[in-house]
Amino acid sequence: MTEHEHEHEHVRVAVIGSGFGGLGAAVRLRREGITDFVVLERAGAVGGTWRDNSYPGCACDVPSHLYSFSFAPNADWPRTFSGQEHIREYLERVADTFRLRPHIRFDHEVKQARWDTEKLWWEVETSQGTLTADVVISATGPLSDPKMPDIKGLDAFPGKVFHSARWDHDYDLRGKRVAVIGTGASAIQIVPAIQRDVAQLTLFQRTPPWVMPRADRAITGAERWLHRQLPFTTQARRGLLWGIRELQVQAFTKRPNELGLVEQLAKRNIHRSIKDPALRAKLTPNYRIGCKRILLSNAYYPALAQPNVDVVASGLGEIRGSTLVATDGSEVEVDAIVFSTGFHVTDMPIADRVVGAEGHTLMESWKDGMKALRGATAAGFPNFMTVIGPNTGLGNSSMILMIESQLNYLADYVRQLDVLGGRVALDPRASAVNAWNRRVQDRMERTVWSSGGCSSWYLDESGVNTTLWPGTTTEFRSATRRVDLGEYEVVRAPAAKPAAVPAGRTKKGRGGKVEAGAA
């Protein structure tokens, strides 16, 4: 379609993003018989965070057979923990298998989505024109917009600077003096991947992570053959991986003291790899394991023990020319800086682009902290749903499980709109949103993430955990199985002012059939 045609288009559903959440939503819509939808993707390919994060060593810390859709099993995962390139290939395959590409609009960044209270639809402005939609699904995900710290002197640094999620593959790190800022999940993969090639690597560590061995191996040809010939074996493998993690979650959410044994195993892991007592002390956390995400690596500690690596046990405070000055006063000269400093998780930028029924943005609505009914819908934003919304993250299992639960909720949401009939919208009651959020936060108090003695990216500026789900995936699936209309206001267009399609604009039916002038 041309840009001009897009400016006059109305669709039933507009999905923002083509990562796991966006592609999953698209598949579910097709399964519900809805083909009148678009997927708006700001980049030129599908994949979301698995497209953007292509840094050396990038891989998933959730087993492959659990980190995939239940409706799209993959018998040919090459490793028990797959690399970025294999996960991205999987998502490309999902887009092809379920015939999603005709629905995807690449290079369509959403600039603003504004609710029209008269017509009861969303006006979505993109970088390629404007369209309207009855329902908007935000599937941008929390790991989509890199977070760069505000460091004095960074603008004047003469060397190369980039974030781990925006890796510059044209810049050759070989023989360079490199600083890595941060010690999160990406940093522990980057450090061993580049350590052998760089002249000197300096790791700026504000807080050491707990790191456990990674039980990664190649999946044999015999295993893959078995999974192809007997698909139930793939399901059984997935079920076993899921069940183990369901049992583990109780320690994270209800009995953090039970994590003491795991902590001892993690300390042994440090002792096995780090012989220098001073370095070992730097790398040993002083908070309960699990408070921050437990990281998996067999190569991180051995890399830090190499003679060309230095661990600075403090944050980066200032940059003077090519000299990096830590908050403890130590200095080091470098040629390149890699920021492994995470993402805008508790302040997702898409929230600043969504304008609701009262004329304020979702970001403004969330100024005191993110909250959404069942992790999906926010009061004052009718027919708007977030996939991987507030308090839907996990600390020990696969996010695909949570995404699929939210897709169940999405499917029933659209069914309810059909049952209600006509031009109609559902707006969650503020009382329902607040009641749900209170229950979540009450349960959060006893979790390791709140009581473990650390500060993590799970917490917002007020110290509230608006990121994780304090329960099992089974509990969340039960809570999102269907929409309770009692938790919503049913909004209809004023009887005297039916919501007509603007002149020159067409509206497609569920199957793509054009209904000229439909209201």
Image (cartoon, rainbow, N blue to C red):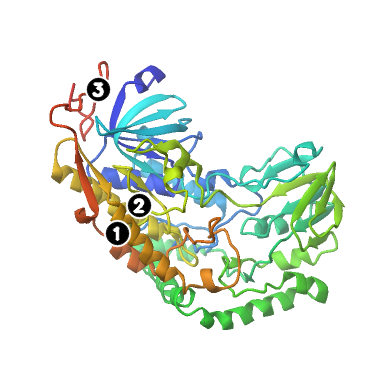
Q: CA distance from mark 3 to mark 1?
A: 34 Å
Residue 505's disc number: none
**Mark earlier in primary sequence (1, 2):** 2
What's the residue at 73%, 41% (across, down)?
Answer: 161
Question: Which callout, 2 or 3, points to the residue nearer the camera?
Answer: 2
Residue 403 found in image quarter:
bottom left
Look at the picture and state if 38 lies above or below 31.
above
Horizontal side of 157 relative to 444 (left or right) equals right
Quick one: label 2, few (<14), some, or many (20+) residues within 10 Å? many
**Mark earlier in primary sequence (2, 3):** 2
Image x and y of residue 272, in percent? 73, 77
Q: CA distance from mark 2 to mark 3?
A: 29 Å
- The reply to whether residue 234 is in sight is no
Q: Secondary structure at mark 2?
A: loop
Residue 312 found in image quarter:
bottom right
What's the residue at 59%, 75% (across, down)?
Answer: 288
Q: Which quarter shows the C terminus?
A: top left
- The reply to whether residue 231 is in sight is yes
Residue 506's disc number: 3
Quick one: label 3, few (<14), some, or many (20+) residues within 10 Å? some
Determine contact: label 2, label 3, CB under 8 Å: no
Q: Which quarter shows the N terminus?
A: top left
Look at the picture and state if 517 lies above or below 409.
above
Image x and y of residue 282, in percent? 76, 70
Residue that badge 1 annotates: 480
**Mark earlier in primary sequence (3, 1):** 1
Q: CA distance from mark 1 to mark 2?
A: 9 Å
Image x and y of residue 40, in percent? 41, 35
Of residue 326 and residue 514, the one placed in the foreground of this image is: 326
Residue that badge 2 annotates: 376
Determine contact: label 1, label 2, CB under 8 Å: yes
